[in-house]
Amino acid sequence: MVLTREYVDVPVGERAMRTFVAKPAAPGSYPGVVFYTDIFQLTESSLRWAVRLAGYGFLVAVPEIYHRVEPAGTVLGFDDPGKVRGQADAEAITTAEFDEDIAAALDWFGAACPTVGAAGHCTGGHLAFRAAFDSRVRGTACWYPTGLHDGKLGKDRSDALERVADIDGELLLIFGSLDPHTPAPAREVVRAGLEGGPTFRWLEFEAEHAFGRDIGPRFDPEATDQAFAETIAFFRRVL
């Protein structure tokens, strides 16, 4: 499927949230997916994932999650300085501010998309989970989300797991069983918190954290392809 790609500025109050948008080039109305990246923002790896998703017939919007603290266009390196900076950026933003950004992204889809979903990797998986609190979101795919078990997201505590009753749509949660950021006990906390709440599907692959990032030693092509196929099937069913 041939795609178009562009950057747009999504208004958040008086600010502008730079957002990458990929969608099918053929005229028509397509389901929307807001995709939240890991702490490194709009890297080539994350954009490739977004473009791949759009190629299956979705309008995919990828906001800069640190637009409040970083200049537009900032992309952090996959190294220790980039990791430290990304974590510091997250810790400078409150949960309420992240939620405001999420609402603005969903508002941007407006009447252009008949249905909307959310997806995210790592920290972005936590943000996507919070996007699920919005009743407009029909389905959310969280790839190795961090901080759900202990409320760690930004400057203050995230109450994400305590608000599962606010989720109307369905969830797809994908983890690597070798993930040190969300080890087995932490995953059990998340799974237990979901029981009796929204409809969810839980998948684990024998892979490390960020196994879907196609740069670096943790990339697992087979697990990535399997998780991606599950994600496509999920969104095609719920959106």
Image: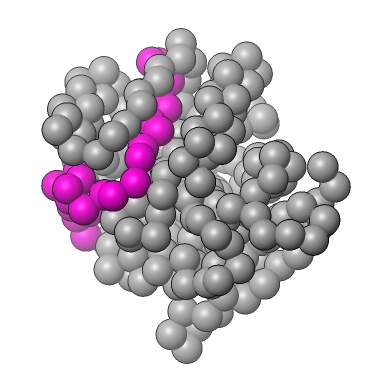
Q: At 62% across and 76% down in the image, what residue appears?
A: 9
Q: Is residue 159 above or below residue 64?
A: above
Q: At 46% across and 41% down in the image, what residue appears?
A: 238
Q: Tell me residue 120's x, y (percent).
A: 48, 44
Q: Tell me residue 76's x, y (percent).
A: 59, 52
Q: Is residue 59 left or right of residue 168?
A: right
The N terminus - image quarter: top right
Q: Is residue 90 above or below residue 146?
A: below
Task: Let me know if residue 199 appears in the view.
Answer: yes
From the viewer's side, name the closer residue of 114 and 129. Answer: 114
Q: Tell me residue 112's x, y (percent).
A: 61, 68
Magenta span includes 239: no
Residue extending furthest toward the bottom: 14
Protein image colouring: one colour
From the viewer's side, name the closer residue of 79 and 108. Answer: 108
Residue extending furthest toward the right: 2
Q: In the rendered image, which quarter is residue 202 located in?
A: top left
Q: Is residue 58 above or below residue 29?
A: above
Magenta span includes 159: yes
Q: Is residue 151 left or right of residue 170?
A: left
Numbered range of the magenta stretch: 156-179
| Number of marks drawn | 0
Q: At 53% across and 72% down in the image, what residue appears?
A: 110
Task: Let me know if residue 69 appears in the view.
Answer: no
Q: In the rendered image, which quarter is residue 199 located in?
A: top left
Q: Is residue 160 left or right of residue 52?
A: left
Q: Tell me residue 163's x, y (percent).
A: 17, 50
